[in-house]
Image (cartoon, rainbow, N blue to C red):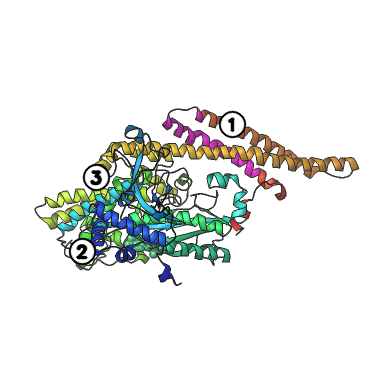
């Protein structure tokens, strides 16, 4: 079969809906999907029936409400379609009620105390804007997950709300510009996914990879990424076979996997899909991560999605390419052909600039996890300080507006809004800076702080909500303006003036920039998760997010609690894994090697004088010293975990984790890594960095 023939064959997509639903049902469902019309039960019943028939024809026996609880992964509970028939047989059945609403026994999903205040259980509700699909033998129905009180217990609900908030405010602006045919503004995302592939046998020999997704020990091999010979290099046959298989699986699920290449580090790769509606892109990215791992197993590989699987080697992120467009296909972040289109473009641009500056804390918060702390704020791409890159050309335009001076020295190009045409910004001039956390790349923004294992939901919730807030303020001003053109001009100029501190076109990794950003510009530098989560509780942020109905205040407080606890738990598992590996694997290996050395010394002594054993005794001495140091560090770390376990206040526990546990883990690691460099290879108990990074 050719790709167009099998693309989307496991998806109940528009083609299936058109073919299997009556014209009336199809039209009604389309209204729900495109314009958010409420779905009535008769339509739901018809859709459920068609969906079930299609799924059964394609081998499905079960269905599940597929949802994204706050654990960051996806959850599903399978139910069979079978229902007894009067003749003793069974029929395959699925009702509209089952389609639109399910009721998982979800008491073990984190809710940060939310569910207790409402009902014991949550319910799931079909999100008709994301197509149902078949995975293994199960029809998966993309679903939102709420408490009976209506509080969001998942990542999809706030995302849908944030898209709605942005739509509402952007439509107010478009109406002011005289737009009549536009019905909706939709945000789109193309997430570029980075990952590592290692040999599965080796992976299974490392408890740290199996339990925590990253290596907790490991000395640097003689060769790392310094030769830059991996990036865009030829793809190895085994990896090539994996990528082909992966693409096929993703295409069957209607996921537009498009680009693949090797990344900076050895064994690191990237996959980029073609962008789509934020909501669908989020579902697709969750599925992509799952399929990546599954296909890897089939190829004797393990796919590492952790942000920092290897210390000292480039980490993995997810570049979230974000834009807003009308349902008529106009990208609102693309300069247009007429002066009015350009003024509109500049207004939307200004809205994003203001949003990123005003809500830096929330953007930073949206990507805060224990894993991502190893990238952000660790002299790696990108820094924890949020800034925006606009490129020289656009910067010159903004400067001209700010100072009311001619653009590029051409008097004719004086930016009088509503009077001049802007140049087109092609990506060559906009995408040179790879160090910026939030870069304008021609017709979209690329938010580069998202961690490789993160759901992209939270980042997009915050971007959408913050931009909706700028647009609300702009719409308020413009709707009541006496002179629209003047107000528009002043609004753009004043916004640039007020928020230009967030714009930085230089090298984001530079220490001098971090100093300038924090000391001169007053930008936030929240380096660790406990600090980065705090903006969630700030008055100004709560007000914005609740006013736009993206979160309720209790949802925000619960998310703060869940994420903070998640941070503590993640690091705690890492610490315990280190203790286990050091005691059961590393120290015994060092001892075994030391005893081989001392045996040799004994044998040489037995032969008599004249045979030197200085090498063995020096080495055994160094290793014994290291073993003492490791033993001490293990006890200290173990003790710190016990102290942590005794702490009741989760905020204090998170601070203790950051300040005490992590530094003790580093001390233990440094002793073990040094021992690794001194111990004979055959004694070392698990595959090394060199084995893992160059072993595929
Ligand atoms: P790269 O950044 O790797 O050079 P591209 O810029 O071509 O590659 O694309 C990166 C991602 O951005 C892809 O997922 C692509 O589909 C997505 N993308 C392109 N245009 C838009 C847009 N208007 N809105 C959102 N995402 C987009
Ligand atoms: Mg890119």
Disc 2 versus disc 1: distance between alpha carbons? 63 Å
Pick whichever of labels 2 and 1 is earlier in the sequence: 2
Residue at 56% over, 47% down? 209
Q: Nearer the viewer, residue 111 or 62?
A: 62
Q: Write down the region rendered in magenta.
A: 645-674
Under tag 3, what secondary structure? loop
Q: Is residue 293 left or right of residue 337?
A: right
How far from the left and from the top, in percent, is residue 602? 84, 40
**Residue located beneath label 1 in the image:** 636
For the residues carrying marks 2 and 3, which lies nearer the camera in this image?
Answer: 3
Q: Is residue 353 above or below residue 624?
A: below
Which residue is most to the front? 87
Pick whichever of labels 2 and 3 is earlier in the sequence: 2
Residue at 49% over, 40% down? 570
**Residue located beneath label 3 in the image:** 548
Is residue 484 in view from this perspective? yes
Q: Is residue 691 left or right of residue 408?
A: right
Under tag 1, what secondary structure? helix
């Amino acid at each position: 079969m050719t790709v167009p023939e099998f693309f989307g064959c496991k998806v109940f997509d528009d083609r299936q809906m058109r073919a299997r639903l009556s014209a009336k049902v199809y039209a009604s469902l389309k209204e729900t999907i495109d314009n958010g019309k409420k779905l009535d039960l008769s339509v739901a019943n018809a859709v459920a029936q068609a969906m079930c028939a299609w799924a059964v024809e394609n081998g499905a026996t079960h269905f599940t409400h597929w949802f994204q609880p706050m654990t960051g992964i996806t959850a599903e509970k399978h139910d069979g379609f079978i229902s007894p028939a009067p003749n003793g047989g069974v029929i395959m059945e699925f009702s509209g009620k089952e389609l639109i609403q399910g009721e998982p026994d979800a008491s073990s999903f984190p809710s940060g105390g939310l569910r207790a205040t409402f009902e014991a259980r949550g319910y799931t509700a079909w999100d008709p804007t994301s197509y149902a699909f078949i995975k293994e033998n199960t029809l998966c129905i993309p679903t939102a997950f709420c408490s009976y009180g209506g509080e969001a217990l998942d990542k999809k609900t706030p995302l849908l709300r944030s898209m709605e908030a942005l739509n509402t405010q952007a439509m107010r602006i478009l109406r002011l510009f005289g737009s009549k045919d536009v019905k909706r503004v939709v945000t789109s995302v193309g997430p570029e996914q980075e990952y590592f592939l290692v040999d599965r046998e080796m992976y299974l020999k490392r408890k740290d990879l199996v339990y925590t997704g990253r290596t907790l020990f490991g000395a640097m091999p003689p060769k790392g990424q310094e030769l830059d010979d991996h990036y865009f290099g030829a793809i190895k046959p085994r990896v090539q076979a994996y990528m082909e298989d992966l693409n096929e699986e993703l295409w069957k699920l209607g996921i537009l996997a498009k680009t693949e290449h090797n990344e900076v580090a050895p064994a690191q790769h990237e996959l980029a899909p073609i962008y789509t509606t934020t909501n669908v892109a989020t579902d697709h990215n969750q599925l992509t991560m799952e399929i990546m791992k599954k296909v890897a197993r089939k190829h004797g590989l393990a796919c590492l999605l952790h942000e920092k699987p290897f210390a000292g080697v480039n980490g993995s992120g997810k570049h979230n390419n974000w834009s807003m467009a009308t349902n008529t296909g106009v990208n609102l972040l693309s300069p247009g052909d007429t002066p009015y289109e350009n003024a509109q473009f500049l207004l939307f641009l200004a809205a994003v600039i203001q949003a990123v500056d005003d809500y830096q804390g929330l953007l930073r918060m949206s990507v805060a996890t224990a894993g991502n702390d190893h990238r952000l704020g660790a002299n790696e791409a990108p820094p924890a300080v949020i800034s925006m890159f606009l490129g020289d050309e656009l910067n010159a335009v903004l400067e001209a507006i700010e100072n009311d001076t001619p653009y590029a020295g051409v008097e004719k190009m004086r930016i009088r809004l509503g009077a001049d045409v802007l140049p087109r910004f092609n990506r060559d001039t906009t995408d040179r800076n790879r160090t910026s956390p939030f870069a304008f790349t021609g017709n979209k923004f690329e938010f580069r702080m998202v961690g490789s294992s993160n759901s992209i939901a939270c980042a997009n919730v915050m971007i959408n909500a913050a931009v909706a807030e700028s647009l609300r303020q702009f719409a308020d001003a413009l709707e009541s303006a006496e002179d629209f053109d003047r107000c528009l001009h002043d609004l753009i100029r004043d916004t640039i003036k007020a928020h230009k501190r967030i714009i930085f076109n230089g090298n984001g990794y530079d220490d001098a920039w971090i100093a300038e950003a924090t000391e001169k510009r007053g930008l936030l530098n929240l380096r660790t998760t406990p600090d980065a989560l705090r903006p969630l509780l700030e008055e100004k942020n709560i007000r914005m997010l609740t006013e736009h109905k993206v979160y309720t205040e209790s949802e925000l407080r619960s998310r703060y609690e869940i994420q903070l606890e998640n941070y503590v738990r993640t690091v705690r598992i890492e610490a315990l894994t280190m203790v286990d590996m050091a005691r059961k694997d590393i120290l015994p290996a060092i001892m075994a090697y030391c005893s081989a050395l001392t045996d040799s010394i004994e044998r040489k002594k037995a032969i008599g004088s004249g045979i030197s054993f200085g090498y063995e005794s020096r080495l055994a001495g160094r290793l014994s010293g290291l073993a003492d140091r490791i033993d001490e560090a293990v006890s200290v770390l173990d003790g710190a975990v016990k102290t942590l376990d005794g702490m009741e206040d989760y905020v204090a526990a998170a601070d203790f984790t950051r300040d005490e546990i992590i530094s003790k883990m580093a001390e233990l690691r440094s002793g073990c890594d040094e021992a690794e460099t001194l111990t004979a290879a055959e004694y070392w108990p698990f595959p090394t960095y060199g084995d893992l990074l160059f072993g595929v």
